[in-house]
Image (cartoon, rainbow, N blue to C red):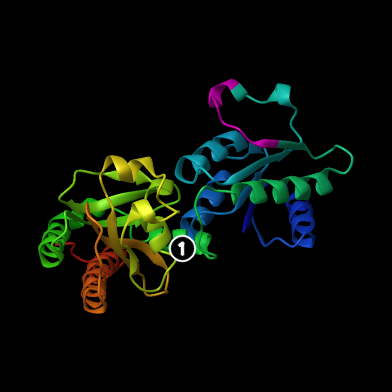
């Protein structure tokens, strides 16, 4: 979805018409505050197109805030303001495309820039689910105060490590750029870049993903992070939210290659299901104002 922010109703409508004629779905707002509310409601957007002069701030400020939580969001200043009229120094290294509304063919240029930005954004070093933006929106409902679950999840990962006789067991949430671990028994890891973790691939599968020997798998044989951690065996079951989106994994790692039979896959799925039940319960309590205790 393309989020368009412009206090001028006519210009907002014109920008949305051009983008929708180009095949994009848009949502329009008239202020920075309304843009923040829209992002909070629907989750990360594909692209932000904003006027520089907003009634409650500037477009550059809105871009900076958006990129802080979603670094991959394509951002375009579609504005009447000239470069010399903007306080660009106040926003450091904020980078965005810039299109003057009063330039000839500006609407067509806007559509072309959005198309290019989104195509470039999709060229990552790892595969993405087809519904990545919706998946991230689902994840945002569970990622609030994850530390509150650490004690109960620590018990599960410790039990799993013993059950399957592996070096480590972990619960991780796969965000837009990294995997953040809510619990990690047998290893001391808070997060990993998404391109360095096998869980990035595990969330693409409905069932349990097993890598018997990472050094023999072409996807991971050159992965320096796995080699440094001496991880060769991996098994991961997706944490699947009620809407069917995988937000993370319950995973096992070991330093030696090994097989993982059907019964073990069933048991690991049960650990993942139990973890997801706890995440879902806490989400419901939080959203209904219930007692987290």
Q: Is residue 7 visible?
A: no
Q: Is residue 139 visible?
A: yes
- Give the structural element (helix, strand or loop) at label 1: helix
| In front of the other: 191 or 3 | 191
Q: Residue furthest front?
A: 216
From the viewer's perspective, tell me whether residue 286 is left or right of residue 23.
left
Tell me if mark 1 has few (under 14), some (14-19) or many (20+) residues whose alpha carbon lies within 10 angstroms of its own: many
The N terminus appears in which quarter of the rendering? bottom right
The C terminus appears in which quarter of the rendering? bottom left
The picture places residue 241, in percent across and down from the top left corner, at 36, 70
Q: Residue at x 46, y 63 (%)?
A: 135
From the viewer's perspective, tell me whether residue 225 is left or right of residue 185.
right
Residue 283 image-quadrant placement: bottom left
The picture places residue 253, in percent across and down from the top left corner, at 24, 56
Number of marks in the rendered image: 1
From the viewer's perspective, tell me whether residue 126 is left or right of residue 48.
left
From the viewer's perspective, tell me whether residue 103 is left or right of residue 49.
right
* Bounds of the magenta segment: 89-97
* Above or below 194: residue 201: below
Residue 106 image-quadrant placement: top right
The picture places residue 66, in percent across and down from the top left corner, at 52, 43
- The residue where tag 1 is placed is 135
The picture places residue 44, in percent across and down from the top left corner, at 51, 54
Q: Is residue 78 magenta?
A: no
* Above or below 165: residue 49: above
């Amino acid at each position: 979805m393309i989020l368009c922010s412009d206090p001028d109703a006519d210009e907002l409508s014109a920008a949305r018409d051009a983008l929708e004629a180009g095949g994009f779905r848009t949502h329009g707002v008239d202020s920075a505050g309304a843009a923040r509310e829209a992002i909070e409601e629907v989750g990360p957007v594909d692209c932000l197109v904003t006027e520089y002069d907003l009634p409650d701030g500037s477009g550059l400020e809105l871009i900076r805030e958006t990129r802080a939580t979603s670094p991959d969001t394509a951002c375009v200043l579609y504005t009447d303001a000239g470069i010399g009229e903007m306080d660009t120094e106040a926003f450091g290294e904020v980078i965005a495309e810039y299109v003057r509304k009063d330039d000839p063919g500006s609407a067509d240029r806007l559509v072309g820039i959005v198309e290019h930005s989104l195509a470039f954004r999709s060229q990552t070093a790892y595969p993405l689910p087809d519904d990545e933006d919706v998946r991230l929106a689902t994840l945002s409902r569970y990622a609030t105060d994850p530390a509150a679950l650490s004690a109960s999840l620590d018990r599960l990962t410790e039990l799993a490590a013993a059950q399957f006789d592996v070096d480590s067991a972990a619960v991780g949430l796969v965000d837009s750029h990294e995997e953040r671990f809510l619990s990690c028994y047998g290893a001391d890891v808070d997060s990993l870049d998404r391109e360095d973790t096998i869980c990035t691939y595990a969330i693409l599968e409905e069932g349990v993903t097993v890598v018997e020997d990472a050094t023999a798998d072409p996807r991971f044989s050159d992965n320096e992070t796995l080699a440094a951690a001496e991880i060769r065996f991996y098994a991961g079951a997706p944490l699947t939210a009620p809407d069917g989106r995988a937000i993370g994994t319950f995973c096992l790692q070991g330093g030696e290659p090994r097989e993982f039979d059907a019964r073990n896959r069933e048991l690991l799925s049960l650990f993942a299901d139990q973890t997801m039940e706890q995440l879902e319960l806490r989400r419901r309590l939080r959203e209904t104002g219930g007692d987290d205790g």
